[in-house]
Every structure is written in C-alpha cells, then in structure tokens.
C-alpha cells in the first residue's frame, strides 16, 4: 500500500465525458487520492463479443492522474452483459428451486460454468494487458462482494458436476462419502458420485452433512473463480500492483480466510445506516465488523465502500446526523483501515441504486456532504500519513470459524440461536468496556492472548482439543461454550462418550443432559455471591429484575469432573447445578459457559475474565470515558495513536485533559462534540 488515505468509488461511464475534468478537480479539492472504477462496466469495456474498448477508461484514468488521483480497477465478473447471456443462457445461475435467475440486476452468473469462465479469462487478460503500464493504475479489485446475491446459487448442471468432482476428490470413494454423510438414514446411499445432487429443494428435510459439504464446496468454488482472475493479473501486471477484494464483514458465503490467500490485503464495505434499518448500527456492531475484517489478514485493511450519505434502493433510509459520516470513517481508521474509499462519488440518475446517495447529489453540485467529508479529509490525512500499517495491541480474542457458522446455519439447534449473534454478544461485552478484541481462527497460535473465547465449537476433533489444551496449560484462559464437541467434522454426532466430547478432559466436566430453552430464561446466581448485585434486568425476560443474570436459549446440565462451579442455575429441575464452570489446568484455566448468557451475565463473565487476566482498555493510557464513547488505539514503531469516538448525539466530557497531544478532531475543554472524535498521540 502506498499511503492513499481517502478515495471514492467512481463511475465515469454514468456521466458525459465533458464532466470528467470537473469531477477530477472537485475530487482533488476534497483531498481524494484514489478511486475505484469499472467493477460493473463489462458492456462498456466489451460492447460486442471480442471488441474490447478500454479507451474511455484510459481517458478517465488520465484525467484523474493529472489531479494526483490513482485508480483501482475492478474486474467486471459480477455483471456479464446481455449479448453474452442471449448467446449462452446457461451462464445464468439456477436456484435450489430449479428456477433460473435472469438478467436485469447483477450477479446473474454461474461461477463454475466453463463458457463463462472463458469469457472472464479473456476479459481479465485483456484488461491486465491493456492497463499494465498505465501509470495511473495501482491495483485491482476482483469481482464485487463475492457472495452478495449468490447466497444459494448456483445449482445448475455445471455446478452439480463440479460438486461431484469436489466430493470425489475429498472422499476418494463413494463408500467414504456414504459414511461421512450418514446416508443410511432415509435410504440416501449413493452407488456412484454421479448420483449426488446439490441440496436442491426437497419435499422435506435435508441431510446436514450434505449441506455442510455444499457450503464448503461453494466457498471453494468462489475462491477458485477468483484465483483464475488473480493468477492472470499477477502474471501480467507489474508486481507493485496490488490485488484485493471488497468483503462484507461476517458474510459467510465464501471463507475470507481462504480467499485472502490470493490477495495482498482485504477491503470491507461499511454501511452503518442501511435503508432497511430505522437506526444506525450500534458502535459495537460497527466495531465487530471492522475487527472481524482485520482478523482476515491480521493486518490493516481498506474500506472500499464507506457510506457517505442517505442509502436506498426502492425505499430510502434516514439521513445520517451531522458528524456521523465522518465519525464512521474515523471509526474505520480506529479499527485498522489505512485507506477509506467513499461510496460513491455522485448519486446516479438511473438504475437500481438511484437513491444510494454519494458525496455529490444527483445534480453534481457540491453540498453539505461534500463539505463535511472535505473537513474530515483535511483533518485526518496528515495523521493517517504516518499511521499506515499500525495495528492495535490486543490481548483478548474471539475465535471465528466459517465451518461452525455453516453448521449452525444448517441446524440452529434451538429457536433463535445464531452463530454470529453469539460471537457478537461476547464481543459486545468487551466493546462495552473498551477492551480491544481480535478475531482469530481455530488453529491460530493463541499464545499472545490472555483470554480466548471460542463460542459454539460444535464441530470438533482431537487435534482441536489438543491445540486448546496446549494454550491453557501454557497459561491461557480459554472459554468454551454450550454445544461444544457435539459433532465430528462431517456433521455427524459424536459417539465416543458424553458431551462436550473431545473437550471433556480439558474442561473437567460432562454434559449428559441439556434443556433447549428457546425463548425461555433460567435465572442463575454466582457461586461466590460476588456477581449477584448488578443493577440490570435481563434483556429477554422479566424474571430477574434486579440483576438480570439469566441463562437463555440453552441450558447444559453439567456434572463436575474436576472443574469448579462459577454460576449455578437458580430454577428448573436442575436448580443448584452449574451453568458456568472453570477448570485449572497447567498454568491456565479452561472455562465453560453452558448457556447463552443474558447481557448482564455476559458482563459478569467478561468482568471476571478481565479481572482474572488483567486485560483492560487501551493499555497504559488509563483513559476514562463516559458511556457511548469508544476508545481504541493503533501502534507502530513505538508510536501510538489513541482514538476517542463519541457515538452519541450529546456532548461528552472526558478526563483526558492535557495528558495527551490532540493530533486531529476536537477536544475543546475536554469535551467531544456530538458524534465528535479526537485522535491523540499516545
Ligand atoms: C454494495 C456494492 C455496491 C453497491 C452498494 C450499495 O456494497 O458493493 O456495488 O451496490 O452495495 O447498494
Ligand atoms: Zn451453476
């Protein structure tokens, strides 16, 4: 990366060419240094089969370059043109219902279709060849938001055959596949791989092992579709060009862990106030997306689409309050973004996204959004120049696994349980205390963390148990939760002993019975009595007015086999049995939370963990802020930047005084304006 800081998503082809110099001039005045272009411009670049036209894009790139603005080019494989579809209708994707999804929107492509892949290869080769020496081009974005609109697509014949080949490679023989999928049930045995279908709509039910493999296959297919493109680009363009992709937070259609292996860094698209909501995302909901994306490459990232104004398709969402758009951009930087690209330069006159507003309104006349974003850019650019590559120092981690998410997507186990919802609930409690969190993978080296939360470790094997055990024995604090060790990796139930299966020894417990509570709550109380005096009520029931300590959605009925109880159930037939336990092992501790904690219980657990491990807010700063104000930091080469973000519409007082030098934002008389921010020298 080369210090770009701020940019915009630009669609010059939506506007008459005479306007382009004016756009470039306005961009320069705003302080923009980079644009992304062309990711949906297939028809403009190949109006007829084999007739490539890149000259319009050359002209746009040149005009921008003269104003000091570089270009990132998107490959247009999310929008094959109508001439191609008419000639090869089989390129269009087929849903689980067998119905083809047609032309007229975007993502109307099948990513395994060999004919389509040939077209994609030719287009990407032609683009890379054409732009490789263009001094205005610095990098590439592959496709656009992989997984967007492709949720259960595609199940066409080509995808079916690709799935069968993928399975043959994974299992070697059809007997192994039958074993792995438990096909003895409902007479689902296969005699040959050619009999296997994608999980199409059936009269009733689906095989969870089959669906899990379909999700794995689908993720691999997208990575492969992308790799075809990254391989071509890398073989042609100078090595200084970067290749990236704009991800969508916790979207799980494709594993970003796998996808990122072919990329130089990842980007995220951030819309805190999407039109389908009546309020903007809560600060922790923004933070979790950003920290999740930083966890993909364990490195700074870009925001490739940062909300700049009102969003909308058929209907529009509310207007961000004054200060909110800049605050969201600084929030992105605070969690690790090196460059922030606003979506989009100018609101478009035609098409589905007419009402998705940009920095400029439809008229193209700069207004309040332009001015507000301009002030932000002038304020933040000097600070961000030095910050490139800086990372937060983090001592708490949450394990995020695509496979566990898929397994819970297939079988939520109980009404309302959601893998990502559970992760976010843990994250929220840390965020609330301004304790920074990393998202890590199951098999990552965990030794740098004081606390690791691994929620819902449903699919497990002895290697995973050994990996976690090593972390604990060396002094770590590991938290496993309900539904741990329930299944082996292919989604068949574990049969070697009681739950939590391979984790029983590590946790010093067994779980022989459980109560899938759904929307019911069971009160809990702390064994020491120390956590029972919280001033809260449960976020889902009214049983515990006063302290809000509840087990919700699920209750594991735990037998202690060496562990100690931390919280006990305070109701139901299993009253006085443990809901939360801790087992000392080697230098560390293995905790088990046998339920979904209510918010208040979650806070109590996180308080305990923080106290136990000495994990706090921005290390060494001792900054105290009122509720609604977030504190984060990034560090590099002994330098530290501290971000103070006021997410509320009220003025907030802090205790920062003159202990720190204010580098950007405003902290007048120690006060942050509504939606105000300050970046301090740490
Ligand atoms: C996504 C896409 C963009 C645009 C915006 C607004 O993030 O990547 O192309 O569609 O949403 O809807
Ligand atoms: Zn297909």
Image: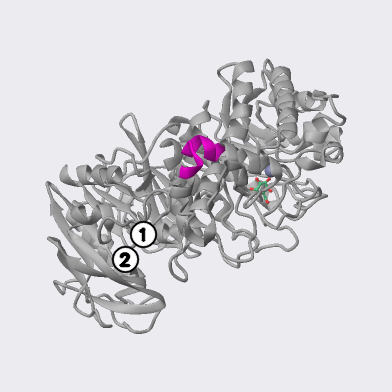
User: In the rendered image, which quarter is residue 540 located in?
Assistant: bottom left
Q: Are marks 2 and 1 in contact (CB under 8 Å)?
A: yes
Would you name the residue on which mark 2 appears? 602
Q: Residues within 10 Å of mark 2 (few under 14, many from 20)?
A: many
Q: Which numbered disc flags the more N-terminal residue, 2 or 1?
A: 1
Query: Which picture quadrant has residue 295?
Result: top left
Magenta: predominant secondary structure element? Answer: helix
Estimate the x, y position of residue 376 in percent, counting from the top left.
56, 44
Q: How many marks?
A: 2
Secondary structure beneath dot 1 equals: helix
Decide: is 582 above or below 8: below
Label 2, secondary structure: give it.
helix
Residue bearing mark 1 = 426
Residue 10, magenta (yes or no): no
Residue placed farthest to the front in the image? 191
Please tell me the numbered disc located at residue 537. none
The magenta region covers 166-175
Residue 168 lies in the magenta stretch = yes
Residue 436 image offset from top left, x and y in percent: 34, 49
* Residue positioned 34% across, 84% down in the render: 543
With respect to residue 129, does 4 lie above or below? below
Q: Residue at x 86, y 33 (%)?
A: 18
Q: In the shown orientation, is residue 491 left or right of residue 375?
A: left
């Amino acid at each position: 990366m080369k210090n770009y800081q701020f940019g915009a998503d630009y669609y010059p082809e939506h506007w008459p060419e005479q306007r382009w110099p004016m756009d470039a001039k306005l961009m320069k005045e705003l302080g923009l240094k980079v644009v992304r272009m062309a990711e949906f411009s297939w028809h403009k670049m190949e109006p007829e089969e084999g007739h490539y036209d890149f000259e319009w894009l050359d002209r746009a790139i040149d005009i921008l370059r003269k104003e000091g603005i570089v270009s990132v080019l998107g490959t247009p494989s999310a929008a094959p043109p109508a001439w191609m579809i008419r000639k090869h209708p089989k390129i269009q994707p087929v849903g689980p219902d067998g119905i083809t999804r047609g032309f007229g929107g975007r993502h109307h492509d099948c990513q395994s279709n060999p004919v389509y892949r040939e077209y994609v290869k030719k287009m990407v080769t032609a683009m890379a060849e054409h732009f490789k020496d263009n001094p205005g081009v610095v990098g590439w974005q592959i496709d656009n938001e992989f997984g967007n609109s492709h949720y259960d697509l595609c199940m066409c014949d080509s995808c079916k055959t690709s799935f069968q080949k993928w399975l043959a490679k994974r299992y070697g023989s059809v007997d192994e596949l039958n074993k792995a999928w438990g096909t003895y049930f409902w007479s689902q045995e296969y005699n040959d791989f050619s009999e296997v279908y994608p999980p199409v709509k059936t009269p009733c039910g689906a095989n969870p092992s089959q669906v899990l493999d379909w999700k794995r296959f689908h993720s691999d297919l997208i990575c492969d579709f992308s790799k075809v493109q990254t391989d071509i680009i890398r073989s042609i363009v100078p090595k200084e060009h970067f290749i990236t992709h704009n991800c969508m937070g916790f979207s799980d259609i494709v594993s970003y862990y796998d996808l990122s292996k072919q990329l130089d860094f990842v980007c995220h698209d951030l819309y805190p106030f999407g039109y389908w909501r009546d309020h903007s995302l809560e600060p922790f909901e923004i933070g979790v997306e950003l920290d999740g994306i930083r966890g993909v490459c364990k490195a700074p990232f870009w925001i490739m689409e940062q909300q700049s104004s009102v969003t909308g398709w058929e209907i529009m969402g509310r207007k961000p309050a004054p200060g909110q758009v800049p605050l969201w951009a600084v929030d992105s930087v605070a969690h690790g973004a090196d460059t922030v690209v606003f979506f989009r330069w100018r609101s478009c006159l035609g098409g589905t996204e007419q009402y998705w507003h940009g920095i400029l309104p439809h008229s193209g006349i700069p207004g309040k959004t332009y001015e507000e974003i301009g002030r932000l850019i002038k304020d933040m650019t000097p600070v961000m120049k030095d910050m490139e590559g800086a990372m937060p120092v983090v001592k708490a981690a949450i394990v995020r696994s695509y496979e566990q998410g898929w397994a819970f997507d297939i079988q939520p186990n109980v009404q309302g349980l959601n893998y990502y919802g559970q992760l976010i609930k843990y994250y929220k409690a840390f965020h609330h205390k301004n304790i920074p969190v990393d998202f890590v993978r199951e098999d990552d080296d965990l030794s740098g963390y004081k606390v690791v939360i691994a929620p819902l470790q449903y699919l497990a094997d002895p290697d995973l148990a050994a990996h976690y055990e090593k972390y604990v024995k060396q002094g770590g604090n590991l938290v496993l939760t309900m539904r741990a060790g329930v299944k082996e990796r292919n989604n068949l139930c574990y049969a070697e002993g009681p739950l939590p299966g391979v984790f029983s020894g590590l946790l010093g417990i067994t779980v022989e019975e459980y109560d899938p509570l759904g929307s019911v709550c069971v009160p809990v109380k702390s064994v020491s009595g120390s956590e029972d005096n919280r001033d809260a009520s449960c976020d889902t029931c009214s049983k515990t007015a006063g302290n809000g300590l509840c087990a919700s959605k699920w209750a594991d009925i735990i037998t202690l086999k060496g562990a100690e109880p931390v919280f006990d159930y305070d109701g139901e037939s299993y009253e006085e049995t443990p809901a939360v336990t801790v087992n000392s092992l080697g230098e560390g501790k293995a905790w088990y939370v046998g339920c979904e904690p209510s918010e208040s219980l979650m806070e109590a657990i996180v308080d305990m963990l923080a106290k136990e491990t000495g994990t706090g807010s921005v290390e060494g700063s001792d900054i105290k802020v009122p509720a609604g104000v977030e504190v984060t930091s990034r560090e590099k080469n002994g330098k530290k930047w501290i971000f103070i973000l006021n997410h509320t519409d009220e003025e907030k007082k802090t205790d920062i005084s003159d202990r720190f030098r204010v580098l950007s934002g405003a902290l007048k008389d120690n006060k942050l304006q509504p939606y105000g921010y300050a970046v301090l020298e740490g």
